[in-house]
Image: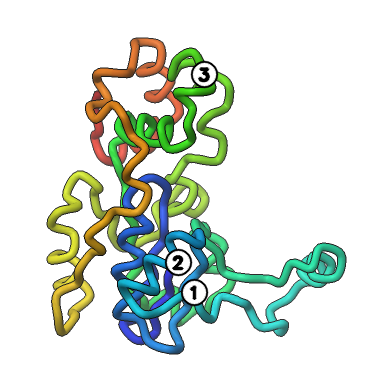
């Protein structure tokens, strides 16, 4: 997740949508006062190599602490922070109103059938479950619904949702939409891109899995008109 005061945007990061690759690309144009949340150490190394920057300014000032936040700090040693995959509701609650209202807020969404297969291999579930349906019915998608990241009280809270399916054109599109002086570029190696074995989701999903995905991702399917 990134809050760029330099370019006045908020990037809301969803799961399995090339979010880390885009986050690394956006980090390269960030200023010293921008908020960039931590990612895995391997990805941080990629970010330092590509963008010459790392996670920064993600700790929240103690003036924003609630009693619960102080308790977490005291008992768990956990300071209040902006974090990876933070929801719009949480971001809105922790930035000034003028920032939330005026900055360009955006995210990425992906065909849920394709996204589920990507997650299945990313988590190594093909080695742990007899089938993708077993993975799904045993809670494999718990906490994975991106709609709840970019919506508040069931209403989309970002200004624009880009489609993963148009990822090749995303840098050019964002260069225009963010009014950047130079072309945004992605790192050559996609983050977390080497785990998937079956490329076409139709070669893996059975009827029971398809129906379960339709149920779980009904809001995304309705919003974007995604189909199997």
As rendered, which of 157 and 198 lies closer to the eye?
198
Residue 12 position by quadrant: bottom left
Measured as percent of width and height from the top left, residue 203 is found at 25, 18
Instruction: Looking at the image, tell me whether mark 1 or mark 3 is earlier in sequence order.
Output: 1
For image coordinates 45% across by 66% down, the residue present is: 44
Name the residue rendered at 37%, 61% in the picture: 158
Q: In the displayed structure, does residue 92 sit left or right of residue 103? A: right
State if disc 2 and disc 1 touch (CB < 8 Å).
Answer: yes
Q: Can you see residue 96?
A: no
User: Which image quarter holds the N terminus?
Assistant: bottom left
Name the secondary structure under disc 1: loop
Asked if residue 227 is positioned above or below residue 85 in the image, the reply reads above
In the rendering, at what x and y percent does residue 223 appear? 30, 40
Identify the residue under disc 3. 129
The residues bearing labels 1 and 3 have C-alpha atoms spaced at a distance of 35 Å
Labelled disc at residue 74: none
Q: Is residue 184 visible?
A: yes
Give residue 44's mark.
Answer: 2
Q: Quadrant of residue 7?
A: bottom left
* Mark closer to the chain start, 3 or 2: 2
- Secondary structure of the residue carrying numbered label 2: helix
Q: Residues within 10 Å of mark 3 (few under 14, many from 20)?
A: some
Q: Residues within 10 Å of mark 1 (few under 14, many from 20)?
A: some
Kind of element beneath mark 3:
loop
Between 179 and 157, the residue placed more toward the observer is 179
């Amino acid at each position: 997740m990134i809050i760029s005061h330099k370019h006045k945007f908020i990037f809301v990061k969803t799961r399995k949508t090339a979010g880390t690759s885009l986050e690394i690309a956006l980090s390269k144009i960030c200023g010293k006062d921008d908020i960039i949340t931590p990612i895995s150490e391997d990805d941080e190394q990629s970010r330092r190599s590509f963008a010459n920057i790392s996670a920064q300014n993600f700790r929240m000032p103690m003036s924003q602490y609630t009693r619960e936040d102080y308790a977490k700090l005291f008992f768990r040693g956990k300071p209040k922070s902006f974090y990876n995959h933070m929801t719009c509701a949480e971001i809105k609650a922790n930035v000034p109103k003028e920032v939330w209202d005026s900055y360009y807020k955006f995210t990425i969404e992906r065909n849920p059938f394709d996204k589920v297969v990507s997650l299945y291999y990313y988590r190594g579930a093909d080695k742990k479950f007899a089938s993708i349906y077993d993975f799904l019915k045993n809670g494999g998608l718990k906490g994975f619904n991106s709609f709840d990241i970019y919506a508040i009280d069931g209403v989309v809270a970002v200004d624009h949702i880009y489609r993963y399916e148009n990822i090749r054109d995303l840098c050019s599109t964002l260069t225009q939409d963010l009014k950047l002086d130079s072309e945004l570029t992605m790192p050559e190696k996609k983050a977390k891109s080497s785990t998937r074995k079956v490329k076409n989701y139709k070669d893996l999903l059975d009827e029971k899995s398809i129906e379960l995905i339709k149920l779980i991702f009904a809001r995304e399917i309705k919003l974007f008109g995604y189909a199997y």
